[in-house]
Image (tube, rainbow, N blue to C red):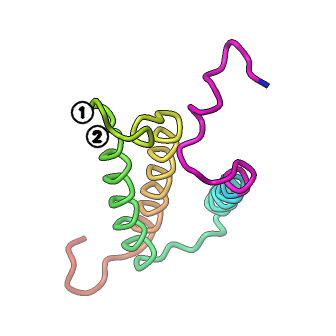
Amino acid sequence: MPQPFLPPLEAFQGSNLPYWLLLSFQLLILVLMLRVAWRVQTDRLVPSRRAGLWLAWAGAAYMAFALGRIAVGLAVPDAHAWFKTWIPAFFHLVLAGFVLAVSLYHLRGTAPTRGEEP
């Protein structure tokens, strides 16, 4: 139901996925993020340097892609509508930031491997 104080529904939809499928993926991602955050908070997530490095690379690539999407949307006037859906783009930045934060948790909780600087 449209509300005057909310953006139109199209502003929340950045893909061609059916809304029920998109919402299902979003809820799954939210549950996974909550599970990771809970495990960090309760000291149940064991830091792993390998996981930290993998997450750092994946998070950096994801962040670069999300920022690139926004940059194209701002710089190219006739860019495809996907580049100009700001609400999903913002949430991709939040998700990339979460991945980078979890990578720091892993990297700070482990000792450097042989041959690396501390």
- For the question of whether residue 37 can be seen, the reply is yes
User: What is the quadrant of residue 69 in the picture?
Assistant: top left
- Whether pointer 1 and pointer 2 mark residues with C-beta atoms closer than 8 Å, the reply is yes
Q: Which residue is labeled 1 in the image?
A: 75
Residue 42 visible somewhere in the drawing = no
Give the answer, above or below, for where 61 lies relative to 113: above
Q: Residue 2 shows which numbered tag?
A: none
The reply to whether the magenta stretch includes residue 19 is yes
* Residue depicted at x 61% and y 60%: 40
Magenta span: 2-24
| Amino acid under disc 1 | Ala
Quadrant where the image shows the N terminus = top right
33 vs 27, left or right, is left
SS category of the residue bearing label 1 = helix
Q: Residues within 10 Å of mark 2 (few under 14, many from 20)?
A: some
**Could you say where residue 17 lies in the image, as x and y percent from the top left?**
62, 54
The image shows residue 28 at horizontal and vertical percentages of 70, 59
